[in-house]
């Protein structure tokens, strides 16, 4: 029996693959390598192709005894999603439809879905729990919410059980030092700040300093990527044990402003990091902080690497050792 990981060559996907391998699971990865990296897949069987290609996907299911799916494959940039919404509907919503249809055809009944805090939009209160309003402020969040809902209707109709994991801000790198964050172009705060520390960028742009927060910059909840990865294994275990479908926040429960993240990065790296203030980025809510209580209680999840200093230090180790990321692969 194998676990299929779509998008397993991406940042969070590759850490989930590593965690599955460490647990001794058989892993099948599907990735079109549009964003992912071959070198990020530390083991298992890699199929390079697109989940929207029905023949390709049906072949993957025919060649392997897939028991459960962890679905990461998606476009995930807030800024880009505001400029090219069609891309997000095609890759994310239509891609998920293709995957679910194939799962139904192949009688695969378990899916762990990579969702996002962006599904909430501007929260009504902090910290956010799973029953709070979902009103995305960007196309990325909107498509992820649509995907979640689509999966729910496949559960109702076909009994495909799901766990949807709403991540807050993933950061950090694997303790082995072999995998980490490498997006092209990079748009995420932590890697950009560390690239500035390395001298690869002249400065970090801070998007907006007029938010209603302690210092005017956006508040986010940073969670270590390996803690996220662990949650996927627990979610799959829940489904394998006959557990109910459900939605869970994955965050540390602590919020940090963009300015605070930059300050911690200055301490951790001992380098100068110049910050320049720029206008707000379209679609960014002021503050997103999770209540992870439900995941802790019902999945038995513990965000173990929960100090921002440690999360940034682990990312820093990756950046220092891989200044060009995975390089050409
Ligand atoms: N951010 C920033 N400068 C950057 C990139 C991000 O000020 O160059 C801010 C962004 O506005 C958000 C936070 O950092 O408030 C985290 O952004 P990121 O893109 O890392 O993750 P997101 O919250 O969009 O998932």
Image (cartoon, rainbow, N blue to C red):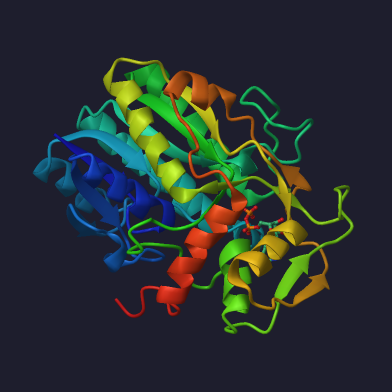
Q: Which quadrant would the C terminus be assigned to in this image?
A: bottom left
Q: Position of residue 137 (x, y in %)?
A: 72, 46
**Residue 188 visible somewhere in the drawing:** no
Q: Quadrant of ligand 1?
A: bottom right
- Between 124 and 314, the residue placed more toward the observer is 314
Whole-percent x and y of residue 64? 12, 42
**Residue extending furthest left?**
63
Q: Nearer the viewer, residue 219 or 208?
A: 219
Q: Residue at x 70, y 64 (%)?
A: 262
Q: How many marks on residues?
A: 0
Residue plotted at (62% across, 39% down): 119
Q: Quadrant of residue 132?
A: top right
Residue 198's quadrant in the figure? bottom right
Q: Say if 168 sits above or below 281 in the image.
A: above
Left or right of residue 285, residue 237 in this image: left
Q: What x and y, as percent, mark residue 316? A: 51, 67
Where 279 falls versus 167 (above or below)?
below
Q: Is residue 104 rendered to the left or right of residue 317?
A: left
Question: Is the N terminus in the top left, top right, bottom left or bottom right quadrant?
Answer: top left
Q: Nearer the viewer, residue 131 or 306?
A: 306
Whether residue 176 sits left or right of residue 35 in the image: it is left
Q: Is residue 15 visible?
A: yes
Residue 32, position in %: x, y? 32, 61
- Of the pair 83 and 48, the residue shown nearer to us: 48
| Above or below, comparing residue 328 to residue 227 in the picture | below
**Residue at x-position 38% and y-position 34%:** 112
Horizontal side of 203 relative to 9 (left or right) equals right
């Amino acid at each position: 029996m194998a676990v299929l990981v779509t998008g397993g060559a991406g940042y969070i996907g590759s850490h989930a693959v590593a965690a599955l391998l460490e647990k001794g699971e058989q892993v099948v990865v599907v990735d079109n390598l549009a964003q992912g990296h071959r070198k990020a897949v530390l083991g298992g069987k890699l199929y390079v192709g697109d989940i929207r290609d029905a023949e390709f996907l049906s072949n993957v299911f025919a060649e392997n005894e897939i028991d459960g799916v962890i679905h990461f494959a998606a476009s995930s940039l807030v800024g880009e999603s505001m400029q090219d919404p069609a891309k997000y509907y095609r890759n994310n919503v239509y891609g998920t439809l293709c995957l679910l249809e194939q799962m139904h055809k192949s009688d695969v009944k378990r899916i762990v879905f990579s969702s996002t805090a962006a599904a909430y939009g501007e929260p009504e209160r902090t910290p956010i729990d799973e029953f709070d309003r979902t009103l995305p402020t960007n196309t990325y969040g909107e498509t992820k919410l649509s995907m979640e809902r689509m999966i729910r209707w496949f559960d109702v109709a076909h009994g495909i059980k799901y766990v949807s994991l709403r991540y807050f801000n993933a950061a950090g790198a694997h303790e082995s030092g072999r995998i980490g964050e490498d997006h092209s172009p990079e748009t995420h705060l932590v890697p950009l700040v560390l690239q500035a520390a390395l001298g690869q960028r002249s400065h970090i742009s801070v998007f907006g300093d007029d938010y209603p927060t302690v210092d005017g910059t956006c508040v986010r909840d940073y969670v270590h990527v390996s803690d996220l990865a662990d949650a996927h294994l627990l979610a799959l275990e829940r489904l394998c044990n006959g557990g109910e479908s459900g939605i869970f926040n994955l965050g540390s429960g602590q919020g940090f402003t963009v300015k605070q993240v930059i300050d911690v990065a200055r301490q951790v790296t001992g380098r100068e990091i110049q910050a320049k203030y720029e206008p707000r980025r379209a679609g960014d809510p002021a503050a997103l902080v999770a209540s992870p209580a439900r995941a802790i209680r019902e999945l038995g999840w513990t965000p173990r690497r929960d100090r921002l200093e440690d999360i940034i230090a682990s990312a820093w180790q990756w950046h220092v050792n891989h200044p060009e990321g995975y390089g050409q692969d």
